[in-house]
Image (cartoon, helix red, strand yellow):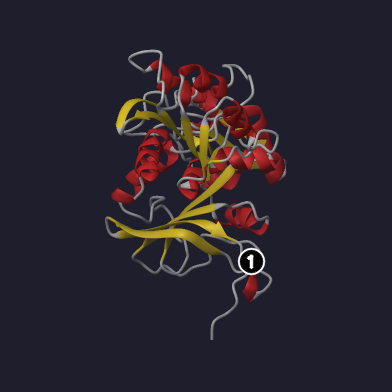
C-alpha cells in the first residue's frame, strides 16, 4: 500500500460516516496530512454540508496547513454553490498538494478542480483508490448522470427462489439475524419503495429500528407504487409516528417515480422491498443497480416468485454481479453485488 492509498483509506472511512445522511449531496471524506502526520479530518454532516474539506479545515488547530497534503475521496467542488468552492478554501489554507479519488460525476464540473488548483501552484494527484471512492457516491453519480437514484433491490427467498408462505403465517422466511441486518441496509438509503399489493398483503412498517441508527438519520421516505390506490385508515404506513414520511405514487411509471424522488425529495439511493411482480418490473426496465438477496435454507415450491417479470430475452442478456460477496447471516446466506450488464456468453 502506498502512502497515498493509506491516507485515502482513512478518508474513505470518514466518508462512510455520511452514508444515508448526506443526500442530496455525496458522502465525502477528507484528511489533511503533513510530514506523515494527520492534522485533521472531516466527515459529512446531515445533507452533506458543510463539505468534508471545509470540516477538515475547520478542525485544524491553526488556520494554516502550509505544505500539507489534502486527501479527499471526491474531486473538490470548484463552483460557489451555497458554501463557496472547496478549491478556494484549500488554496487559502495553504496546502501544497491535493489528492482525490473520484472525479466529480457532474459533467459540468468534472476535472475543473485540477486546473484551478494547479494554477494556484498546488500539485494534484487524482484517481487514488478511484473504484472504492466512486462506489461511495454511486447514488449521487446516478442522479447527476441519469436523473434518478441508485436502486438497491432487496429480497428474501427460499433456495428455489420463492416467497411462498402458508395462509396466516408471518411474513418472514429468514431468521432474526438477517432481519436485523436489513435495518442496517435501510439506514444506507434515502427512500424505500414497495408496492400497493405488498402493503395490502403484509401491512409493513418499513421503518428504521435499532440502536445503531445514526443520530442525524431521518426515517427514509416510504414510497408506495400503486394503480388501485389504498385505504389510508387500514395500514400503519399512514397512521404511525412517521406517516409524514409516506408517499403514494399512483399510476406513475417507474422512471417517473424515481425521477420524482431524486428531484423533489433529495433521494440519491433507494431500496426496493416488494413482491415478485414489482421486483420483476424494475428488472425488466433495467432499473435495478444492485442486489441484496437473503437465501433461507428451505425449499417451498409454489407460485409466488421472489422476482418475476418477463425475464431476459436471451442467454447472453443474463445479468451478473460485480464485486459480489456471499456471507452467512445466522442460518441464512446473504448475497450482495452490483449489477453487471456486460454480455455473458454461455459456458459449455
Residue 250 shows in the view: no
Q: Quadrant of the C terminus?
A: bottom right
Q: Residue furthest left?
A: 330
172 displayed left or right of 239 = left
Where residue 18 appears, as percent x and y from the top left, is 43, 31
In the picture of the structure, the residue carrying the numbered disc 1 is 311
Q: Residue furthest bottom?
A: 348
Where residue 99 appears, as percent x and y from the top left, is 47, 37
Quick one: 134 or 181, which is closer to the camera? 134
Quick one: 15 or 310, which is closer to the camera? 15
- The image quadrant of residue 270 is top right
56 displayed left or right of 304 = left
Where residue 56 appears, as percent x and y from the top left, is 41, 23
Where residue 200 appears, as percent x and y from the top left, is 55, 43
Q: How many marks?
A: 1
* Relative to 281, residue 220 above or below: above
> Could you tell me which secondary element the residue under label 1 belongs to?
loop
294 displayed left or right of 142 = left
Residue 277 shows in the view: yes
Crowding at dot 1, Cα within 10 Å, few <14 / some 14-19 / many 20+, comes out as few
Q: Residue furthest front?
A: 121
Q: Residue at horizontal 40%, vertical 20%?
A: 65
Quick one: 112 or 15, which is closer to the camera? 112
Amino acid at each position: 500500500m502506498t502512502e497515498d492509498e493509506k491516507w485515502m483509506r482513512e478518508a474513505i472511512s470518514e466518508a462512510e460516516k455520511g452514508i444515508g445522511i448526506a443526500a442530496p449531496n455525496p458522502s465525502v471524506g477528507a484528511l489533511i496530512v503533513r510530514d506523515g502526520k494527520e492534522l485533521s479530518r472531516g466527515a459529512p454532516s446531515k445533507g452533506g454540508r458543510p463539505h468534508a474539506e471545509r470540516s477538515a479545515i475547520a478542525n485544524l488547530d491553526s488556520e494554516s496547513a502550509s505544505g500539507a497534503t489534502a486527501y479527499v475521496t471526491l474531486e473538490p467542488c470548484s463552483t460557489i454553490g451555497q458554501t463557496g468552492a472547496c478549491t478556494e478554501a484549500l488554496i487559502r489554507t495553504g496546502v501544497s498538494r491535493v489528492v482525490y479519488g473520484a472525479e466529480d460525476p457532474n459533467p459540468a464540473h468534472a476535472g475543473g478542480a485540477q486546473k484551478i488548483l494547479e494554477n494556484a501552484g498546488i500539485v494534484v494527484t487524482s484517481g487514488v483508490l478511484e473504484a472504492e471512492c466512486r462506489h461511495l457516491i454511486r447514488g449521487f453519480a446516478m442522479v447527476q448522470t441519469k436523473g434518478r437514484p441508485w436502486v438497491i433491490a432487496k429480497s428474501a427467498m427460499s433456495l428455489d427462489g420463492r416467497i411462498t408462505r402458508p395462509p396466516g403465517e408471518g411474513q418472514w422466511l429468514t431468521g432474526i439475524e438477517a432481519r436485523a441486518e436489513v435495518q442496517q441496509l435501510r439506514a444506507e438509503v434515502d427512500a424505500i419503495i414497495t408496492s400497493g399489493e405488498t402493503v395490502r398483503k403484509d401491512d409493513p412498517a418499513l421503518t428504521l429500528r435499532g440502536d445503531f441508527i445514526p443520530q442525524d438519520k431521518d426515517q427514509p421516505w416510504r414510497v408506495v407504487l400503486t394503480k388501485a390506490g389504498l385505504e389510508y385508515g387500514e395500514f400503519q404506513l399512514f397512521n404511525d409516528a412517521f406517516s409524514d414520511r409516506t408517499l403514494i405514487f399512483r399510476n406513475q411509471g417507474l422512471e417517473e417515480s424515481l425521477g420524482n424522488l431524486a428531484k423533489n425529495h433529495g433521494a440519491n439511493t433507494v431500496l426496493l422491498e416488494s413482491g415478485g411482480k414489482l421486483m420483476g418490473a424494475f428488472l425488466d426496465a433495467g432499473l435495478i443497480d444492485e442486489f441484496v438477496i437473503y437465501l433461507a435454507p428451505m425449499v417451498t415450491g409454489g407460485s409466488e416468485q421472489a422476482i418475476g417479470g418477463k425475464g431476459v430475452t436471451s442467454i447472453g442478456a443474463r445479468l451478473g454481479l460485480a464485486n459480489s460477496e456471499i456471507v452467512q447471516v445466522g442460518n441464512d446466506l446473504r448475497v450482495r453485488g452490483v449489477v453487471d450488464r456486460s454480455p455473458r456468453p454461455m459456458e459449455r
